[in-house]
Amino acid sequence: MDKFLIKGGKALHGKVAISGAKNSALPVMAAALLTKERITLHNIPKVRDLITMSKLLAFMGAKVSITDIPASDYVIQAVTLSDAVAPYELVKTMRASILTLGPLMARMGVARVSLPGGCAIGARPVDLHLAALEKMGAEITTDHGYIQAKVPNEGRLKGANITFEKITVTGTENILMAAVLAEGETALNNAAREPEVTDLVDMLRKMGAQIEGDCSSTLRIRGVEKLHGTEHTVIPDRIEAGTFLIAGAITDGDLTLTNCAPDHLASIIAKLEQTGVRIETIDKTTLRVQGAKKLIAADVTTEEYPGFATDMQAQYMALATQAQGASVITETIFENRYLHASEMLRMGANITVDGRRAVVRGPSPLTGTPVIASDLRASASLVLAGLVAEGETVIDRVYHIDRGYEDIVKKLRGVGAQIVRLHIKD
């Protein structure tokens, strides 16, 4: 099982190229199931979850072609689908398997999808997905860890007026894909507005879907008989970009981020500037971050987009350990997303957790020690803490970070970090 070894204390300087967004690549790959024609995708990040998704699509009968291993360009063509099943063995490490449910129901009228696995950051129930599909005419049961869904009498899903009880990104994406081939019009109210949802809308529209209301909380979809192939480039990963903004800030460094989307980072940039970090927008795809000699504590509350992303909460906590004063962090999206706090405490952080609220008092001199990553973003937060800790930090279970960050060791080493991957035999 691989580990990271980090020697902290060095400011980061240089350029980092941001990869494509994992959370955008996953749904657009699933959307390839909606047509018999060829889908060509670019800027796919070379991370484990995308490899798992490609294996899942191939299992269902789609032809997945790549030029390199791992690949940034994919050609996917699902002329026929031999199996409408997402088996547990393939998807147990990846919650995004649920994103195949909508496309399978739209195209085949039947699906058997394993209830999703993934990170241990609290419940992320799929009941909102299932309730919406039932409103569209699907019959759904769950047994033995699988969702079994079908449209009666081999018919098509029907358009419906759907209001999500709470905002759900994957729910919005799933029902959006289900609706593009449904009979009639579907209205999705209280829909997610994340850039990744808008990216999916852009691709579906290229395929011939009729969708209105992107970037708003109401999407209107008029179903069509069929969709055609297209070519699409995935948007940059705003969470990776935010992580590297904090890497530059926490080490008092000077980093230039290329191939990013500053427009998607407004809440993160605003919060970092509140702590004293200097961030400059160079152009539409480039940011520069310069650390502050003295970071200032600032409170943060996670919210759905365009608010402060829950996927940046752990990384911000690492920064808060080095800020003067008390930072109050409130997690409103997931109920169990402070598992990284206990590991930071072992490094010398001053953190008090009470339910969904954490108080971080700083600055705290961190010291290197063995720590364990509990999930994808927790992994990133421990890397950030290790970059400023005195001595050596060893991070175990880094397979989590491999799910969502492309070549993070190589990228960090390229800007001066002292980090290596250790290959440990079980």
Image (cartoon, rainbow, N blue to C red):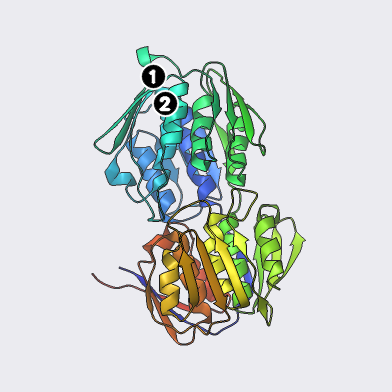
Q: Quadrant of the N terminus?
A: bottom left
Residue 159 in the figure: left or right of residue 115: right
Quadrant in which residue 317 is drawn: bottom right
Proximity of marks 1 and 2: CB atoms separated by less than 8 Å: yes
Q: Position of residue 124 (x, y in %)?
A: 42, 46
Q: Secondary structure at mark 1?
A: loop
Q: Position of residue 421 (x, y in %)?
A: 40, 73
> Mark 1: few, some, or many residues within 10 Å (few <14, many ≥20)?
many
Q: Is residue 314 visible in the rendered structure shown here?
A: no
**Quick check: 407 above or below 22?**
below
* Residue 283: assigned label: none
Badge 2 is on which residue? 105
Q: Nearer the viewer, residue 196 or 77?
A: 196
**Quick check: 31 above or below 346?**
above
* Residue 151: assigned label: 1
Quadrant in which residue 277 is drawn: bottom right
Q: Is residue 75 visible in the rendered structure shown here?
A: yes
